[in-house]
């Protein structure tokens, strides 16, 4: 479970709830037509923007923001790769077949290429393509949530306009005019809520997860190339730590 997502959502919703409770307007929060307009409209526009093969991954991706897959930390990846480099140095590159049975799929795929006697450039190109395809898949889903974050407030504004039209229509009926004004205000609330509590945070969280996964694969690729050349663990460690430091500087 991702505690930052849970805590952020609880804190944000709590702040909204407190503000509405303090103003004694909690009873106005639920409006079915407003909800359908914003949520349904946002989903519809996002569907029109992205193909179904991207949209079908959005429910799972939303779930991952609360319950993410375990991503091995860079330090642990470095230690494991250096351990394997020591094994290669002492027992030869063929030892990788047995030593990596329980390791990451990406690492095992690279080991197969090494044992199949692919040259260094071919291994690098193949593994980098794999990383590129992974990032493209992830970025498409991230863009879908980012787009939804833009559509939500727009549908909220559309609801506001509809509500204003209702106000103008029922100027001679205060009760009906009040109901129309409620639609205008609540729809705007829903649009802002969908964008800032669901869509945009999800896009940002998925990008963060993707970058972490990419860093791990980049370290593995460096390790694979080192295995190919049977580099000493100390040399490999320096390369990997330098890469992590450069990655952190780039993020800053």
Image: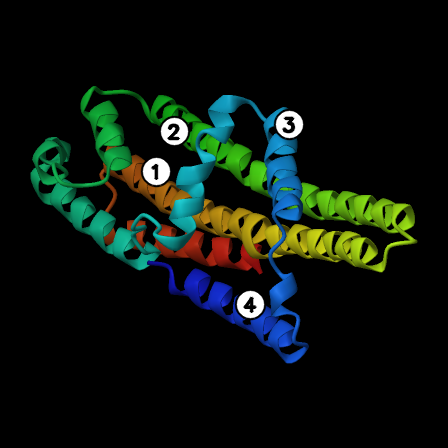
Q: Name the residue under label 1.
A: 221
Say whether marks 2 and 1 touch (CB < 8 Å).
yes
Q: Does label 3 or label 4 sit earlier along the sequence?
A: 4
Residue shown at 32% from the left, 56% from the top: 73
> Going from the N terminus, do you reach mark 4 or mark 2 first?
4
State how far apart marks 3 and 4 are (Cα): 29 Å
Compared with residue 74, is residue 102 higher up or lower down, i.e. above or below?
above
Q: How crowded is mark 3: few (under 14 residues within 10 Å), some or many (20 or more)?
A: some
Q: In the rendered image, which quarter contains the N terminus?
A: bottom left
Q: Quadrant of residue 230?
A: top left
Residue 12 image label: 4
- Separation (CA) of disc 1 from disc 3: 35 Å
Q: How far apart are marks 1 and 4 (CA)?
A: 40 Å
Q: Which one is closest to the eye, mark 4 or mark 2?
A: 4
Q: Report helix, strand or loop for mark 2.
A: helix
Q: Which mark lies nearer to you, 1 or 3?
A: 3
């Amino acid at each position: 479970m991702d505690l930052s997502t849970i805590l952020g959502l609880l804190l944000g919703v709590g702040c909204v709830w407190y503000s509405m409770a303090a103003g004694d307007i909690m009873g106005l929060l639920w409006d079915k037509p407003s909800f359908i307009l914003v949520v349904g409209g946002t989903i519809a526009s996002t569907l029109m923007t992205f193909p179904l093969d991207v949209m079908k991954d959005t429910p799972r991706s939303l779930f991952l923001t609360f319950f993410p897959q375990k991503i091995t930390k860079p330090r642990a990846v470095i230690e494991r790769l250096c351990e394997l480099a020591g094994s290669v140095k002492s027992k030869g590159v063929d030892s990788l077949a047995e030593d990596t049975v329980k390791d990451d799929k990406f690492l095992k795929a690279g080991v197969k290429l090494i044992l199949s006697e692919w040259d260094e450039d071919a291994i690098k190109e193949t593994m980098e393509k794999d990383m590129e395809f992974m990032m493209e898949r992830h970025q498409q889903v991230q863009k879908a949530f980012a787009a939804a974050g833009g559509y939500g407030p727009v549908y909220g504004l559309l609801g506001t306009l509809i509500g204003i039209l209702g106000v103008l229509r029922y100027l001679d009926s205060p009760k009906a005019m009040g109901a129309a004004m409620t639609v205008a205000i609540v729809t705007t609330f829903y649009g802002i809520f969908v964008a800032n509590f669901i869509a945009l945070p999800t896009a940002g969280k998925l990008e963060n997860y993707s970058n972490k996964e990419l860093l791990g694969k980049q370290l593995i690729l460096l390790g694979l190339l080192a295995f190919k050349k049977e580099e000493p663990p100390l040399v490999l460690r320096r390369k990997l730590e330098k890469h992590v430091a450069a990655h952190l500087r780039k993020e800053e």
